[in-house]
Amino acid sequence: MCIAIPGKIKAIINESIATVDMGGICRDVNMDLLGGASESMIGKHVLVHVGYAINEISEEESEETMKLLRQIAGLDEIDTFENESP
């Protein structure tokens, strides 16, 4: 099974590479499968698999997918405990 992580394009490095924020972790991602990287892509959301952006998605889909991944990993429980007052 393969998994793609949603992220938001934060910066363009060159015509092929963009910096993508995936849940607070920023990585340089190859954009060639989407036709390359351009300044007009900053702020858009993409799915990233093994260092390549493979699809553009909506902000809502990105947020929902990240929420589900955090639930699967059990990270939503950590956030709940951290936000509770003693």
Image (tube, rainbow, N blue to C red):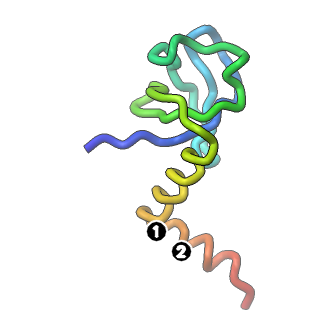
Q: Amino acid at mark 1?
A: Gly
Name the residue beneath numbered marker 2: 77
- Identified by mark 2, the residue type is Glu
Q: Residue at x 44, y 27 (%)?
A: 54
Q: Which residue is mark 1?
A: 74
* For residue 45, above or below residue 84: above
| Disc 2 crowd, CA 10 A, few/some/many (<14, 14-19, 20+) | few
Q: Is residue 38 left or right of residue 29?
A: right
- The 10 Å Cα crowd at callout 1, few under 14, some 14 to 19, many 20 or more, is few
Q: Quadrant of the N terminus?
A: top left
Query: Distance from label 1 to label 2 (Cα)?
Result: 6 Å
- Are dots 1 and 2 in contact, CB under 8 Å? yes
Furthest residue toward left: 1
In the figure, residue 16 lies in which quadrant? top right
Q: Which percent across, then down, holds residue 47? A: 49, 35
Camera-nearest residue between 11 and 62 = 62
Which secondary structure lies at badge 1?
Answer: loop
- Nearest the viewer among 27 and 2 is 2
Q: Residue at x 47, y 42 (%)?
A: 5
Is 72 drawn above or below residue 29 in the view shown?
below
Find residue 37 and report its image quarter.
top right
Residue 63 vs residue 12: left or right?
left
Q: Quadrant of the C terminus?
A: bottom right
Label tally: 2
Residue 8 place in picture, x, y as percent: 63, 36
Q: Pick out the residue farthest to the top.
A: 15
Q: Position of residue 20 (x, y in %)?
A: 61, 32
